[in-house]
Amino acid sequence: MKQNLIYTNNVEAAINGIADGGNHNLTVCIADANTARYAPAGAGLITIPAGDENKTLETVTRVWDEMERMGVTRRTLVINLGGGMVTDLGGFAAATFKRGVRFINVPTTLLGTVDAAVGGKTGFNYNGLKNEIGAFAPASDVIISTRFLDTLPVEEMKSGYAEVVKHAMLSDRGELLRLLEHDFNAPIDHENLLERLRRSVQVKVDIVARDPNEQGERKALNLGHTVGHAFEALAMRRGGPVPHGYAVAWGLVAEAILSHLLLRFPSQDVHLLGNFVRDNYRGFPFTCDDYDELLELMRHDKKSRNGEITCTLLTSIGDYRIDQAVTPDDVTAALDILRDHLGL
Amino acid sequence: MKQNLIYTNNVEAAINGIADGGNHNLTVCIADANTARYAPAGAGLITIPAGDENKTLETVTRVWDEMERMGVTRRTLVINLGGGMVTDLGGFAAATFKRGVRFINVPTTLLGTVDAAVGGKTGFNYNGLKNEIGAFAPASDVIISTRFLDTLPVEEMKSGYAEVVKHAMLSDRGELLRLLEHDFNAPIDHENLLERLRRSVQVKVDIVARDPNEQGERKALNLGHTVGHAFEALAMRRGGPVPHGYAVAWGLVAEAILSHLLLRFPSQDVHLLGNFVRDNYRGFPFTCDDYDELLELMRHDKKSRNGEITCTLLTSIGDYRIDQAVTPDDVTAALDILRDHLGL
């Protein structure tokens, strides 16, 4: 998988450079209601409804139909401009139209930038299952910028930032400490944030390069997600959904605790991380009465096999271990400590 | 693109070898009404309606739904058992379910064996356009046999054979001469035919290996198809559709004539090929009144650019030239000679 990553806050120039560089007959931009205003001049515009509930086959067919109407060919350039929903769905539509039209991603959210836009996963939800249908199809180029983030709600900023923290936990303690000093109330320091994004995305790129089709090592990127997904699903069931990144933040602390219990991950780093998450992500209101349901959700996680709960864990920051089996007792102990730490 | 090709007439043993070799949780066979009876014991069976008119998104979603119901995961083995429609559509469904389930192709028609099953193209018809949506996704293994061909109608046999002839024209005069001696009325000599298939498929494999995503050289495989598609489309418009391979056979002669006119392809070989096609594929009943419509269809062929007609042509057997522009006058001259040769 080869993806050209462009870090810049002059997004328009970067897009024009790509559009001019290829021998394209047409440029088409796929955006949602929130991002259509950023569409480059001169590109045909396909606007899809925003929101994960619209990440459906019906929306995909609407995009295919519009592509047909606009005369998209194998020589067209498609620009996916938006959050993860747009880059996932637009990427799938482009990757399958006439068996593949070149597309680039211009992520406009922090979560989309450090997660969905890079790494080649595309797809949509089907029969109520997230990303159930899709393809591994890399964008030829990804334009990474901070220029869309000034207007991003702080909750979405925090949600994406949890994945940035995750990438540092998988790679570099110095970077992690730098990240944990972040103040979400201060205005964005664009130069600094772009450098943080560069480092964060590179962590994902390096891991994906070693395992493009998710056969093994790519599971490292699931750090925090076994427990995090259980929180996310429980909140959803109870009718009070939480942002994905918040659930991941709590999951990262829980799995850092598990790492401490099972692999001697330093308690000092558990505390540093735990404090940051407590101060910035509130707590997820769960009690010991929820443990059975959380355990059940973890057993049904797609990373699990034969009903065994598996996580990616750390021996220290930067040293991960995939496919670590954890027992219900381990999880219970970790959840106790987590509640204590978050003051629940 | 890596595809393991298995030439055998012990299909069941080959399937079992593949199924046993991987750590699969389940084996699922996709077949149509004609081929379901060949499905291996022990595999879940998904039967789709036969015929190109069912190569639709609706059929794809039915396959996805059945996969869901059967509990297909990333560790399942999917077997596409049928002609090109089954391997194209089943391949797409498998390649996109959970972003990709391993699949193998077991083609049961001659055309499917030497064309659709190998090379990684998958897809379905959309908005009335053939293979408009799809993906480049190779089957991990293709089992090539002659064991399904005894019961194949002679018209389908001839249709596939035209592609076998095409592959020889692209590669090897000795092989071509051998092929032109074939008697469609004689019973199948399985050993000999399997060897012919081995050579034929290898020609496609070698070309695809050099150009997996159809950027250039793969156009060599379009030999005979610029003119052939025009015949096919004209017949369809007039309500008397002809088998694809018949149109290709006529197209091969027409483009051999063009090759002679423009690239000094030897007239002796035009005659050998022309006689074989005349004797085995009847003639397509067209007159000079149809030339304008045929030219118009060639201009709209997806291989054409800017309204120019382009073909793959030969300087001699085995030496092809892609992207050869031909003028309406060239085509008209070739069609005149073709009609003469076929006795129309």
Image: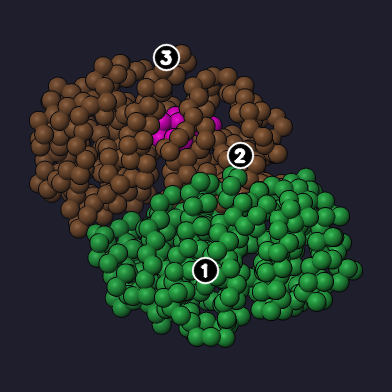
Chain colours: A green, B brown
Residue found at x 58% / y 66%: A176
**Secondary structure under badge 2?**
strand
Q: Residue furthest right?
A: A289
Looking at the rendering, which quadrant does residue B212 occupy? Answer: top left
Mark 3 residue type: Asn
In which quadrant is the C terminus of chain B drawn?
A: top left
**Secondary structure under badge 1?**
helix
Residue at mark 2:
B78
Residue at mark 3:
B192
Residue B146 visible within the image: no
User: Magenta residues, as a range?
Assistant: B106-118
Q: Look at the picture and state if B66 lies above or below A20.
A: above
Mark 2 residue type: Val
Spatial CA distance of label 1 from label 3 is 56 Å
Label 3 chain ID: B
Measuring from the top left, give residue A54's x and y in whole percent.
58, 72
Residue found at x 27% / y 49%: B303
**Secondary structure under badge 3?**
helix
Q: Nearer the viewer, residue B308 or A116?
A: A116
Q: Is residue B114 magenta?
A: yes
- Local packing at callout 1 (Cα closer than 10 Å; few below 14, some 14-19, many 20+) is many
